[in-house]
Amino acid sequence: TEKKLDKFRKKQWNNIKGIRKYQNINRSSTQMLFNEEQGKHILETKNFKTKKNPEMSKDRYTADFKSLCVLNTLDRFEEFEDYPFYYLSPSLKCGRVFTTYNGIPSDFRRCLRLKDGSQLAEVDKKASQPFFISADYLQEVLDIQKSNDAYIYIKEIENRIILDRGSTICDITFDKIVREASKLFNLCLNGNFYKEVAEHCKKEGSPKLHRLFEEHYAEFKSQLLGYGLYNGNKYTGTQFPLKKAHAFERHLYEMFPFFMAYVRKMKSEKGYKSVSIKATTKESKIFIDGVFDTLEASRRDFVAVPVHDALIVRLDEAEEYREMLYQLIKREYKSIFDIYARQDNYGRHLKAEKLFRVTPYL
């Protein structure tokens, strides 16, 4: 097995060596240094009892700590390439790039700095995947509104809701669809999407989900996306009894019936993975393709490592990256930004500092 993994890794390195953006991600990654003293303090003081499997979590932290300490001793790229813990793996399906720093605990990521002593920071988009899904949905709705296909779209949504719920929503109008799409987009835009869903769960008889939001925010987000938006239950293409749905999917349907009809229609036509692939593909288009195309056209020396829906960058350049990401999203969703920038309720959120968060590392 180890031989097969080693063979796979070498093949992967050979496939990506000549691609400039991967070369730059590698160059940036190998410039990082793990603060062993801070990491050791985290390892000794971390309360693993709050984890689902405390023993496994502690073992993972310990193993990652040791591996990061080994990375500190490596200098030449060939040494990194030969060390199994260090990897760079692009996804062919969605364009994401997975590196060593995706896999380590976020506590340890905050212990990273550059070998020249410079501080690092993480620039990320709040509610990133819901934002991209809702933005694509709103853009599609606005495009249809301009065309002559609004009636056909309403009938498709109505048929989907009848199929899913066994009933319809009275008086579906395109204005209602636009209002709901705008409300969803606004929640994702200002970073309140998860909070709003948690409050709805509390009101509608799911206090455990609300407690999960308050006590284990990361787990709440993971379950909401996994069970609420991305799940592939057996009812994807057939009549969908809401009573048998997971609580997260049911609550999302209560809050955003037109949007959820759109999501389930996409799943039935393109497969249940299509929604998550759509979100991560758009995320990669901004955070990887957009950023690295911009940087490679204007600079030779820079530090940027993608981590999920974020970038690890120099702290003193974080604002520059935040503005760059803002301009890329603004260009991607020009029609939405043109409309919303003129509305006071939304326009105040269309700013780089509102859309992207900067978190300095220790």
Image (tube, grey):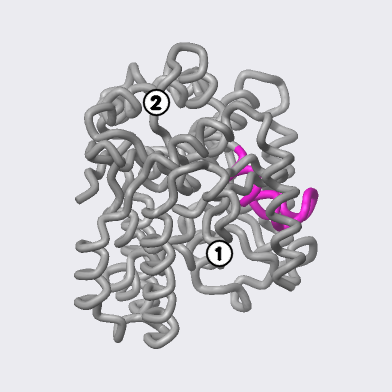
Residue 73 is labelled as none
From where the camera sits, is residue 173 visible? yes
Q: Quadrant of residue 212?
A: bottom left
Q: Earlier in the sequence, mark 1 or mark 2?
A: 1
Determine the residue positioned at 53% across, 50% down. 79
Is residue 126 highlighted in magenta?
A: no
The residue labelled by disc 2 is: 302
Residue stretch in magenta? 263-281
- Residue 277 within the segment the image draws in magenta: yes
**Visible in this render: residue 335?**
no
Q: Nearer the viewer, residue 233 or 261?
A: 233
Report helix, strand or loop for mark 2.
loop
In this orientation, which residue lies closer to the viewer: 245 or 129?
A: 129
The residue that appears at 64% across and 40% down in the rendered structure is 95
In which quadrant of the rendered image does the N terminus lie? bottom right
Is 58 on the left or on the right of 163, as rendered?
left
Distance CA(mark 1)–CA(mark 2): 35 Å
Residue positioned 55% across, 64% down in the render: 226
As drawn, 210 above or below 288: below
**SS at badge 1:** helix
Depth check, mark 1 against mark 2: the one in front is: 2
Residue wearing tag 1: 226
Residue at 39%, 76% in the rendered image: 206
> Where is residue 177 drawn, in percent x and y?
54, 39
Q: On the picture, is 227 further left or further right than 356?
A: right
Magenta stretch: dominant secondary structure: helix
Q: Quadrant of residue 289?
A: top right
**Amino acid bearing label 1:** Gly
Count of marks, rendered view: 2
